[in-house]
Image (cartoon, rainbow, N blue to C red):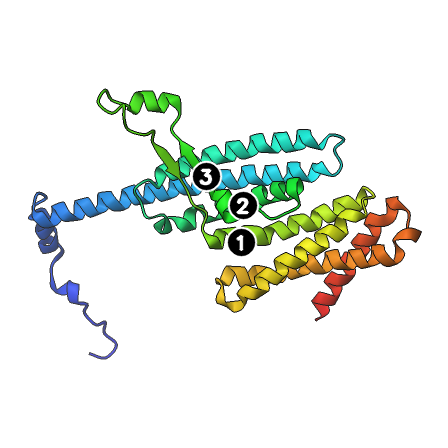
Amino acid sequence: GSGGFRKRKHDNFPHGQRREEKENVNPSSALMTSFKSFQLELDTRHDKYERLVKLSRDITIESKRTIFLLHRFTSAPNGEEILNESEVKLDAVRRKIKQVAQELMGEDMYQFHRAISPGLQEYVEAVSFQYFIKTRSLISVEEINKQLIFAAEDREETTNTISNSHDKPPHTWSLKVTPVDYLLGVADLTGELMRLCIGSVGNGDIDTPFELSQFLRQIYDGFTFIGNTGPYEVSKKLYTLKQSLAKVENACYTLKVRGSEIPKHMLADVFSTKTELIDQEEGLS
């Protein structure tokens, strides 16, 4: 009648009948066995994904600590000690990446790429930052991947080697940084180079900002060749890259025009003022 509730389909079957149907299911049937195997496979994959997320988080944290350490290079009295300490930290990061490579052994990396991508991007940023401080150039993705080939340790070789496999080569693990992760890591590098420029100006170094300006311009020109054909994340970070380049170029302009009349201890203040003006103009636009 009017105002009554419509009967749902499953209300036609008493609750007791549905309970009896569950009890009558044979757990050893082929269908139930298949679903149990599917459940086991999904649980195993989910557990592996969570382990990779945790490793990626550890890689991100240690890479950030390495970047913070490298920023002390401009003010440290002995820069070689900073570089040696950063190399030790990066070796520890690579040991974490080795665990990722072991987890992905025999798996399709792209099925778990979302779990490890943040850590790999931060590692690329840290390695490229250290490489720039050493050589004043950009590290290639091939050079990065060469450092991510790991051989089995002696203890692992002795436990895994059996008597009839002495002639087999030692087991190795490798993990390749994808081109997208490399591009995103290099895009994040530009922000660290902008901060390096500020630190250099604060220490009275007027030559480094001009060198950084040329380097950032080359990176920006390279990214503009990609344009909208690249992944969405790359085009999104291109705006931040452009901001970093504008701040460094405007600081170089100030140093070139007024550098001789500004005391060295006030150069960093001029850079900060110029940065604030750029931010205000971009906010108005």
Q: Where in the figure is residue 84, as x and y percent of width and height?
A: 62, 30
Badge 3: residue crowd in 10 Å (few <14, some 14–19, many ≥20): some
Frontmost of labels 3 and 1 is 3
- Marks 3 and 1, how far apart at CA: 18 Å
Q: Where in the figure is residue 232, as x and y percent of width and height?
A: 49, 63
Residue 184 is marked as 1
Q: State if disc 2 and disc 1 touch (CB < 8 Å).
A: yes
> Badge 3 is on which residue?
148
- Marks 1 and 2, how far apart at CA: 9 Å
Q: Where in the figure is residue 62, as x and y percent of width and height?
A: 55, 37
- Which amino acid does the dot numbered 2 rest on? Val
Where residue 5 sits, quadrant-wise, is bottom left
- Which amino acid does the dot numbered 3 rest on? Leu
- Which amino acid does the dot numbered 1 rest on? Leu
- Marks 3 and 2, how far apart at CA: 11 Å
Q: Earlier in the sequence, mark 3 or mark 1?
A: 3
Q: Earlier in the sequence, mark 3 or mark 2?
A: 2
Residue at the image position 40 percent from the left and 39 percent from the top: 174
Query: Foreground residue, 84 or 71?
Result: 84
Q: Is residue 17 left or right of residue 77?
A: left
Q: Is residue 126 left or right of residue 72?
A: left
Q: Secondary structure at mark 3?
A: loop
Q: State if disc 1 and disc 3 touch (CB < 8 Å).
A: no
Q: Does residue 25 appear in the picture of this structure?
A: no
Q: State if disc 2 and disc 3 touch (CB < 8 Å).
A: no
Up-down: is 153 above or below 249?
Answer: above
Q: Secondary structure at mark 1?
A: helix
